[in-house]
Image: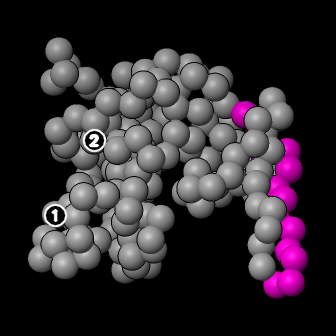
Amino acid sequence: MKAITILQPWASLIACGAKKIETRSWPTKYRGPIAIHAGKGWTMDRRKITYRETFHSALWPNMTKQELMLNGYGRTKLLPVGAVIAIADLVDCQRVVLRVKMKNSGQFVINYAELENRNKVAGNELDFGDYEHNRYAWILENVRRIEPVPARGMQRLWEWNSQILS
């Protein structure tokens, strides 16, 4: 099965269904099942991202901040690394053709990205990806979280021995 390594917390956002589009600097013609691998690296900057309201409410909607602190908030105990954590169907790949950020009195009032198929991306999905002009939106559907399966990740698309799921 094809696999892609995605850094945390974005890999877990896909696994929990909060992120349905993975953004990349390169396109793919591949369509079909894809394993979502959570990369092994886990930097302090990425840990801090999990403190943002949109991230922690998507990742842990039923946990209070106090419970998160007790359970290792923003740490590998709650966000697995170095493992395949979900399977999804990669159904499309669209180029980002427009990134709009319009200000009114110093506040963002219009903030979205437009894909080449004219679909617009906004809200949390926009916050969870890099939608700069000429990047690519990999559209994922039918995401299934699985128990983490330790695996060594790689750059680009790679082959994962998925016999463990058989």
Q: Which type of secondary structure does the marked residue at label 1 adopt? A: loop
Q: Which mark is residue 113?
A: none
Q: Residue at x 39, y 56 (%)?
A: 58
Task: Please identify the quadrant where the N terminus is shown.
Answer: top left
Name the spot of residue 70 as percent of width and height, x first.
Answer: 12, 77
Q: Residue furthest left?
A: 70
Q: Taking 35 as reference, is 151 left or right?
A: left
Asked where in the image residue 8 lies, by quadrant, the reply is bottom left
Residue 139 visible (yes or no): yes
Q: Residue at x 31, y 58 (%)?
A: 61
| Amino acid found under the numbered disc labelled 1 | Lys
Name the spot of residue 24 as percent of width and height, x first.
Answer: 62, 47
**Residue hosting label 1:** 77
Q: Taking 38 as reference, is 120 left or right?
A: right
**Residue hosting label 2:** 85
Neighbour class for label 2 at 10 Å: few (<14), some, many (≥20)? many
Q: Residue at x 56, y 56 (%)?
A: 124
Task: Please identify the quadrant where the C terminus is shown.
Answer: top left
The range drawn in magenta is 94-106
- As rendered, which of 160 and 94 lies closer to the eye? 94
